[in-house]
Image (spheres, rainbow, N blue to C red):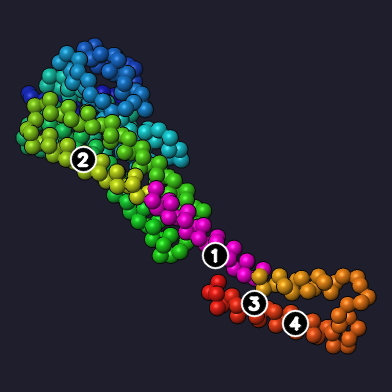
Amino acid sequence: MPIDTIYRTSQCEWIDVEFPTKEDLQFLHERYEINNLLLEDTLDPNHLPKYEEDGNIKFFLLRESTELERKSLNTISDISTKIGIFLVDQTIITIHRMKTKSITETKKQIIGTEKDVVPPSIALRIALLIMKSFDDESISLLETMDNIENEIFLKNTNHTNQIRRLYRLKRKSGLNSRVLSISTDAIDKFRLLNLQDSEVVDLKDKHKDVVADFDHLNAQIPNLISMFLALSDQKANQVMKVLAIYSVYFLPITFIAGVYGMNFDIMPELHHKNGYYFTLGLMGLIVVITFIYARRKQW
């Protein structure tokens, strides 16, 4: 996508670059004298959030949570995409590798406004919408965790699929928490812009709220995994308990059957005409006595 001028007034110019090429970055370097190293940071898919200054250029590199459900959850690029924001005098330049809600929503807000805006104000709106993307993600993960918890404890399900869902939930929560933790310094640097204190405080509060939500998730998910495994072990123990009880019932009569199965001529009741029935009756009596004993012991 070519370099696009989204908004232009006497006080502000907003240039947006989606899917940047090396030619686009070279043009920005020559036109606005932006350091090539800063521009190259916008191409690295796994680059961490940060803030840098180079002369009159202020550079924010933030990451926005995405709705893409990737199979691998190994790096922060699997759950987020980066947005580079350059503030050069009266110009703001945004660079991103894919369509993002924060840029799209900010465009709608800026184009629909009747008053002039300035580059720091645009940067703040983008940052607030980025925090909102993580807030939406935390709400989605909390709902998923509640659904899994209900299935485990109320519906009494014990599927192997549950542990996989819990693992993915844990990975996503941990990666989002890492992004937010690293973003703290960049968010704090918004105080260096020409913004009202209340606006900066609002951004910081939103960041703290989202961090707290993911801290809660990171604390609850391992507990839920532990309880799920404990319930699975308990159910396995119940099965083993039933098998053990049946083994106790049949162990004595198995012994008797083994004795009478031995090849000896002289054996109790061997030649008695009712010996077969006496032996079966004795076996049945032993089973009944064992059953009564187990019930009284509440096994």
Q: Is 215 or 278 nearer to us in this picture?
A: 278
Farthest right residue in view: 265
Which residue corresponds to mark 3?
290
Q: Position of residue 261 (x, y in %)?
A: 85, 72
Q: Whole-Å distance between the Cαs marked 2 and 4? A: 75 Å
In the rendered structure, which amino acid carries the disc numbered 4?
Leu
User: Does the segment drawn in magenta span residue 240?
Assistant: yes
Q: Which residues are magenta?
A: 222-247
Residue at screen point 35% across, 56% down: 146
Q: Provide the secondary structure element on which disc 4 rests.
A: helix
Residue identified by numbered label 2: 208
Q: Which residue is mark 4?
A: 282
Q: Could you tell me which residue is drawn at 29 percent across and 47 percent down?
A: 216
Name the chief secondary structure element in magenta. helix
From the viewer's perspective, is residue 25 above or below residue 128?
Answer: above
Spatial CA span between label 2 and label 3: 63 Å
Sequence-wise, the earlier of marks 2 and 1 is: 2
- Give the SS element for disc 2: helix
Q: How many angstroms separate mark 4 from mark 3 (CA)?
A: 12 Å
Q: Which residue is mark 1?
A: 238
Residue 58 in the image: above or below residue 197: above
Which is more foreground, mark 2 or mark 4? Answer: 4
